Structures are given as C-alpha cells and as structure tokens.
Amino acid sequence: MLMQGKTGLVVGVANKNSIAWAIAERLAAEGARLIFSYQSERLAERVAPLVKELGPSHLVLQCDASSDAEIDALFAQIGQQSETLDCLIHSIAFANREELSGQFVTTSREGFRLANDVSAYSLVALARRAAPLMAKAGGGSIVALTYLGSERVIPNYNVMGVAKAALEASVRYLAADLGPQGIRVNAISAGPISTLAARGIAGFTGMLKQVADKAPLRRNTEAAEVGDTALFLCSDLSRGVTGEIIHVDSGYHIVGM
Ligand code: NAD
Ligand code: 0WE
C-alpha cells in the first residue's frame, strides 16, 4: 500500500475514460484518500457516481481552473477537510476547437491566451495553493499530463503544443522553487489515448495507428500505464526524481522514421 495515509487532489476527471480517472483508481487502490475537482456543474452528475464506486472516503468539489476565485474557494474547502496534502494531479487542457485544425500561424491572440491560461498557468495557480499544505506534510508530489506536441510539430495540435511547452517549462521552474520544501514536480508525456479530449479530433484514429505501427513496443498507450507511472511519481519510490518529463508512449518519442 504505497499511498496509505496519503491525501491527493485530482483535477481533470470528466468521465471514466479520463486519464485522471485511471490515475485516481491506481492511487486509491494503494490506499490514498482523494479529493476530486470537476470543471462545471454539468460534470457533477458524471463524476460523483464514479467517485462513489471508488469508496466512501473520497470527496468531490467543483472548480473551474481558469478562475483564481474558484481555485481559492477549492483550497478553502480542502483546508477544512484535510490538514495536509501529499499529491496533486493536474490533468486538464483546453484550446478552442477551431484552433486544433488548420495552421498554427492563424492562432488568435485570445485563443493563445486561453490555451495557455487553462492548460499551463492553471498548474502554477494550483501548485502555489497546494504547496503550504504539502509542506505541512513534510513534502509532496505534483504530477501534470503533457504530450509530445510540445517538443515536435504534430499536425493540428497547434496552440496546444505551445501551451504544453509552457506547461513543461513550468514543471521545471516549479520544481526548482518548491524542491527546498520537499515538493517534487514532474510530468508524464502520454501517447495518444482515446478520451473525451481526444475524440472528435480530426485524424485521431490515424494517429493511434501510426503509434501502434512505429513505436518500439508496437502498441498504443493504455490509461492504466499512465496510472502506474503516476503512482510511481506520487509515491516515495520516486523520492529522488523532480523536474522530469517521463514519456509513457510505447517509446514513440525516440523514433525518427
Ligand atoms: P479528458 O477530456 O478526460 O480530460 C480533460 C479534462 O480537462 C476534463 O475533465 C475537463 O473538464 C478539464 N478541463 C478543461 N478545462 C478546464 C477548466 N477550465 N477547469 C477545470 N477543468 C478543465 O481528456 P484526457 O485525455 O484525460 O486529458 C487529460 C490530460 O491529459 C490533458 O492535460 C491532456 O492534454 C493530457 N494528454 C492527453 C492525451 C490523450 O491522447 N488523451 C495524451 C497526452 C496528454
Ligand atoms: O491534449 C490533448 C487534447 C487537448 C484538447 C482537446 C480538445 C478537444 C475539444 C484541448 N482542447 C480541446 N478543445 C475542444 O474543444 N491531447 C494530447 C489529445 C490530442 O488532441 C489533438 C491531438 C492529440 C493527441 C489535437 C490535434 C492533434 C493531435
């Protein structure tokens, strides 16, 4: 039981296909008590029953991560429920749909701002509020989800690639700031997985096939594999690891052709 007696905040469950859900299942199976936050009341009726299935000790709260006021309210509620926090899972991203096709050069100022605000700045905002609760526990672990489109040009990923590059750089700067308090900050770069955020992306099925054909492991990434790596990063097994981006992508990122 790697997470016995530990408390985690999981941001980004929309449904049972969410990567955040696969991570939550793994952390809970190892004994973690979890607090979930969902974006909008519309998701409440989806997320609450899922969490109920996971067991009685978990908590579900609403928070739109693009609002400082809502993040403050979230942490006020967390502070009432729990003295300390041991881990934070950041599993959210958003860009305007019309900017996830066509050319990056057409990205609007507002679309660029929105993608970076929701997908990258939200990590900084959440980490700043989580840090005092983690420091009280003697340290903690923050894990974000990223994608190869930050490092390489992936057709149509566009402004999300730039936002993921900002997210990954934020992981390193946060790791440097929070390391002296024993707080580690890392990201998992996952291969394409068929979730709500991925479905309906033009050509997504072709991307799954490309990975299964070319990746060293010759198969797609399963959410459970991301869950296992997140468990490693949240647990004491990774106590010497911070500021790192771990690829969980069947090795696809090493291949040139
Ligand atoms: P998902 O749709 O299940 O999760 C995305 C979540 O982001 C949703 O729960 C949504 O409510 C939340 N969100 C969006 N805007 C928000 C806001 N303003 N406030 C709070 N929450 C907000 O999809 P997913 O694939 O599980 O995505 C989770 C993370 O994994 C994202 O960071 C994504 O970029 C990353 N990722 C996904 C893949 C993939 O292929 N699915 C690959 C690599 C990385
Ligand atoms: O990070 C992502 C997707 C994030 C995402 C998805 C959507 C769809 C709905 C952000 N914003 C939105 N906005 C919406 O309106 N992934 C890693 C999955 C993904 O998305 C792609 C990909 C891959 C992989 C988009 C284009 C190309 C590849």
Image (tube, rainbow, N blue to C red):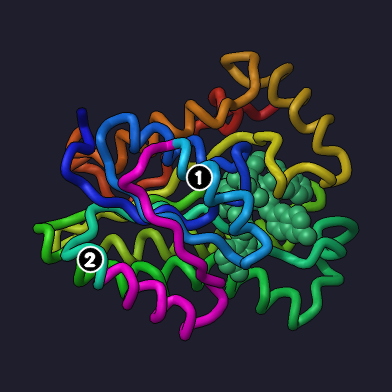
Q: Nearer the viewer, residue 106 or 113?
A: 113
Query: In which quarter of the view is residue 184 placed?
Result: bottom left
Report helix, strand or loop for mark 2: helix
Q: Which dot, 2 or 1, sits closer to the camera?
A: 1
Tell me where residue 177 appears, x and y as whole percent.
24, 69
Eyeballing the image, is 56 above or below 136? above
Q: Residue at x 74, y 82 (%)?
A: 110
- Looking at the rendered structure, the kind of residue marked 2 is Leu
Residue that label 2 marks: 178
Q: Amino acid at mark 1?
A: Ala
Look at the image and tell me whether residue 41 can be seen: yes
**Residue 80: x, y in percent?**
25, 72
Q: Which residue is depicted at the point 83% across and 68% down?
A: 105
User: Is the N terminus in the top left, top right, bottom left or bottom right quadrant?
Assistant: top left
* Residue under pointer 1: 20
Residue 150 visible from this viewpoint = no
What residue is drawn where x is 90% and y is 58%? 102
Pick whichever, 219 or 76, lies toward us: 76
Quarter of the rendering containing residue 76: bottom left
Q: Decide if ligand 1 comes within 8 Å of the CB at mark 1.
A: yes
Task: Using the image, determine if residue 253 lies above or below residue 69.
Answer: above
Instruction: Magenta stretch: give its range.
Output: 54-79
What is the x, y in percent for residue 223?
A: 55, 31
Q: Quadrant of the C terminus?
A: top right
Q: How far across and how far down the image is residue 101, in percent?
A: 86, 56
Q: Do tag 2 and tag 1 residues touch (Cβ < 8 Å)?
A: no
Task: Say few, some or many: other residues with alpha carbon within 10 Å of mark 1 (under 14 / 14 to 19 / 20 or more).
Answer: many
14 sits left or right of 206 in the view = left
Look at the picture and state if 190 lies above or below 130: above
Question: From what the image shows, is residue 66 above or below residue 252?
Answer: below
Identify the mark at residue 197; answer none if there is no mark.
Answer: none
Q: Residue at x 35, y 43 (%)?
A: 56
